[in-house]
Amino acid sequence: MKIAKILGLTLLAVLVAGLLLPERIQIPVAGASAKDWNSKSFWFEPWGSSGVHKGIDIFGKTGTPVLSTTDGVVLFTGEIAKGGKVVLVLGPRWRLHYFAHLDSIRTGAFSFVASGDAIGTLGASGNAQGKPAHLHYSIVRMLPAPWKVDGATQGVKKAFFIDPHAYLLER
C-alpha cells in the first residue's frame, strides 16, 4: 500500500508540474501572421473524411521553416496517410501540438525543442498533395475540458481540441 501511495503522489506531482510549466508561444511558420490563415477554418465543415477541420492551415512558400510553437518534447516524427510528413510535440499544460503536410522534417523523436526551433519545412505532403504549400496545425488537450463540448458536429471532441487561431493570438 505504501508503494501505491508513493506512486500516486509522484504521478500527481508530475501532472501538476506539467500544468504549471510556462508556455512561450510562437506562430509556427517563419514570417507568418494571422493574415496567412483563415481564422474561421477551425471546426469548419464539411471537411473531407475528417468531417470537421480540427486545426488551421497556415499558408506560405514551400521550404519555409516550420517552428515549434512552444517548448516541448518531440513524441513522433514520420509519415502518415492524411498528414503526410508530421511532427508531434508534447508541450506545457499536457498539450499535443500537431504539425502536418511538411516538406521535410528537421527534428527527431524524443528530442527537446524550444519555442521557435525549426522542426521542419512547409510543404504539401499527405492529402495536401497538389494543393498550395501549408502547415496544418492542431492542438489537443490530454486533459479534457468538458465545458467546451457543444452541439456542433463532433462537438464532444471540442473537449480535447483547442482553436489554434485563438491560442496563437494569446501570445
Image (tube, helix red, strand yellow):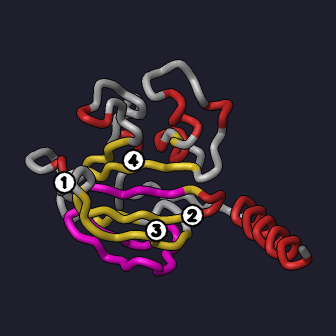
> Mark 3 and mark 2 in contact (Cβ < 8 Å)?
no
Kindly report the distance in space between the C-alpha atoms of the residues bearing marks 4 and 3.
14 Å
Identify whether 120 is placed above or below 170: below
Check disc 1: other Cα within 10 Å, few if <14, some if 14-19, many if 20+.
some
Q: Earlier in the sequence, mark 4 or mark 3?
A: 4
> Mark 3 and mark 1 in contact (Cβ < 8 Å)?
no
Q: Earlier in the sequence, mark 1 or mark 3?
A: 3
- Measuring from the top left, give residue 30's x and y in whole percent: 35, 61
Mark 2 highlights which residue? Answer: 91
Q: Amino acid at mark 1?
A: Gly
Q: Amino acid at mark 3?
A: Gly
- Which mark identifies residue 168? none
Kindly report the distance in space between the C-alpha atoms of the residues bearing marks 2 and 3.
13 Å
- The verdict on residue 15 being magenta is no
Mark 1 highlights which residue? Answer: 126
Q: Position of 133 compared to 161: left or right?
A: left
Quadrant where the N terminus sits is bottom right
- Measuring from the top left, give residue 166's x and y in whole percent: 53, 39
Check disc 4: other Cα within 10 Å, few if <14, some if 14-19, many if 20+.
some
| Label 3 secondary element | loop
Q: Position of 2 compared to 165: left or right?
A: right
Residue at coordinates 44% horizontally, 55% vertically from top-left?
A: 27
Identify whether 88 is placed above or below 143: below
